[in-house]
Structures are given as C-alpha cells and as structure tokens.
Image (cartoon, rainbow, N blue to C red):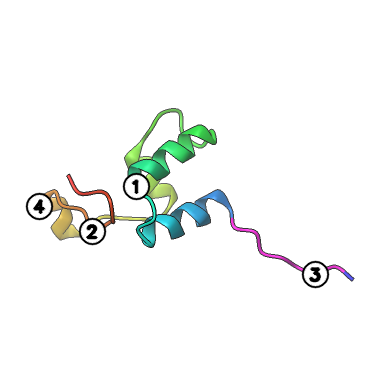
C-alpha cells in the first residue's frame, strides 16, 4: 500500500523560511534564480511567487515587514 507524502515545493519551502525569518527575501530571490524560476535576482517577482506583499505602511515608509528585508 502506498502512503501519500507531502513534499514541499521550492515556493512553499522558501515562503516558510522567509516567514520564519530564517532567510531574507533577497536570499529567497537568489535561490529562485539559481533554480531557474527567474532570469535574474528579482525581489518583486519573488514576492509575487511567494505571495508575500508589503503592507501599505511599509510601502510608504520604505521599511519592510518581511524579516531581513529592511532598507
């Protein structure tokens, strides 16, 4: 009998790592680039792929609520 195992995709894994503060959004962008998901290190594409969005306040102030992504 086969058991169903849930293996995280790269997107799920990176989203968890960014959300837990283990890596920055930039580090996630580098990993996505190395895996061939993006043609260059693209922070906006990474936020979109991981379904991470900055809050309205962080867009106004330039300070991110995503761990490791403060300017």
Residue 32 higher or lower than 17, as above or below: above
Kindly state the secondary structure of the residue where label 4 is placed.
helix
Q: Which residue is mark 4?
A: 61
Question: Is the residue under label 1 in contact with that under label 3 (CB below 8 Å)?
Answer: no
**What is the tally of numbered marks visible in this picture?**
4
Q: Residue 65: give its label.
A: 2
In which quarter of the view is residue 29 placed? top left
Q: Main secondary structure of the magenta part?
A: loop
- How many residues crowd around disc 1 within 10 Å: few (fewer than 14), some, or many (20 or more)? many
Seen at 47% across and 39% down, the residue is 31
Residue 57 screen position, x and y as percent:
14, 59
Task: Please name whichever residue, 57 or 14, is drawn nearer the observer in this view of the structure.
Answer: 14
Q: Which residue is mark 3?
A: 3
Q: Earlier in the sequence, mark 4 or mark 3?
A: 3
Give the foreground label among 1 and 4: 1
- How many residues crowd around disc 3 within 10 Å: few (fewer than 14), some, or many (20 or more)? few
Q: Earlier in the sequence, mark 3 or mark 2?
A: 3
Q: Residue 37: give its label.
A: none
Q: CA distance from mark 4 to mark 3?
A: 49 Å
Q: Which residue is mark 1?
A: 25
Magenta extent: 2-8
Q: Is residue 7 left or right of residue 34?
A: right
Q: CA distance from mark 2 to mark 1?
A: 11 Å
Residue 52 screen position, x and y as percent:
35, 55
Q: CA distance from mark 3 to mark 1?
A: 34 Å
Q: Earlier in the sequence, mark 2 or mark 1?
A: 1
Question: Is the residue under label 4 in contact with that under label 1 (CB below 8 Å)?
Answer: no
Question: Is the residue under label 4 in contact with that under label 2 (CB below 8 Å)?
Answer: no
Q: Earlier in the sequence, mark 3 or mark 1?
A: 3
Seen at 51% across and 55% down, the residue is 13
């Amino acid at each position: 009998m086969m058991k169903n195992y849930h293996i995280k995709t790269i997107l799920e894994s990176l989203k968890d790592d960014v959300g837990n503060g283990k890596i920055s959004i930039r580090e996630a962008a580098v990993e996505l680039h190395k895996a061939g998901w993006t043609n260059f290190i693209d922070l906006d594409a990474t936020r979109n792929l991981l379904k991470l969005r900055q809050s309205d306040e962080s867009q106004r102030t330039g300070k991110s609520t995503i761990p490791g992504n403060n300017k």
